[in-house]
Amino acid sequence: MIKSIKTTLGLATIIILSTMFITACSSQNPPLEKSGAQLWGENCVRCHNAPSPSAFSDNQWETVAMHMKIRANLNSSETAEIVEFLQMAN
């Protein structure tokens, strides 16, 4: 009798903990979009020292971004955010 109670309590605990874990891992809100500064910091320094925003003109940043979009595997939205950040900081 005591063994069956312990088994039942053990199973109940496992079920409750599993439910809490699954609920905590599910995303109810969409992920927040990252700013251009965050994307620049996370992506550009993976392979090289990121140049200063003033290193290139606005037009040059657009050209650099077209090249780096492919090299860094960025999507169009991420690339636009990074270029906007660099042009504003320029």
Image (spheres, helix red, strand yellow):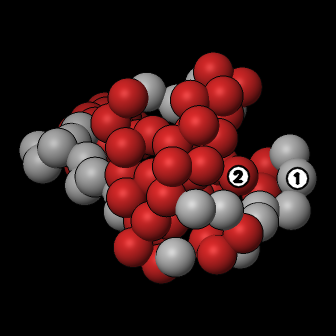
19 lies above or below 55 = above
- Judging depth in this view, the residue of 64 and 34 nearest the camera is 64
User: Residue 33: which numbered mark, if any?
Assistant: none
Whether residue 1 sits left or right of residue 45 in the image: it is: left
Q: Secondary structure at mark 2?
A: helix
Question: Marks 2 and 1, how far apart in space?
Answer: 7 Å
Disc 2 to disc 1: CB gap under 8 Å: yes
Pointer 1 local density, CA inside 10 Å: few below 14, some 14–19, many at least 20: few
Identify the residue at image location x=45%, y=40%: 79
Quarter the N terminus occupies: top left
Residue 40 lies in what quarter of the image? bottom right
The amino acid marked with disc number 1 is His
Pointer 2 local density, CA inside 10 Å: few below 14, some 14–19, many at least 20: some
The amino acid marked with disc number 2 is Cys
82 lies above or below 73 = below
Residue 56 lies in what quarter of the image? bottom right
User: Residue 44: which numbered mark, if any?
Assistant: 2
Q: Is residue 38 visible?
A: no
Q: Secondary structure at mark 1?
A: loop
Q: Residue 70, how many percent across, how many down? A: 63, 21
Q: Is residue 35 visible?
A: yes
- Judging depth in this view, the residue of 80 and 14 nearest the camera is 80
Identify the residue at image location x=86%, y=45%: 47
- Judging depth in this view, the residue of 63 and 76 nearest the camera is 63
User: Residue 48: which numbered mark, if any?
Assistant: 1
Q: Residue 31, how many percent across, how many down? A: 25, 48
Q: Residue 19, how many percent across, how many down? A: 22, 39
Q: Residue furthest left?
A: 28
Identify the residue at image location x=39%, y=73%: 88
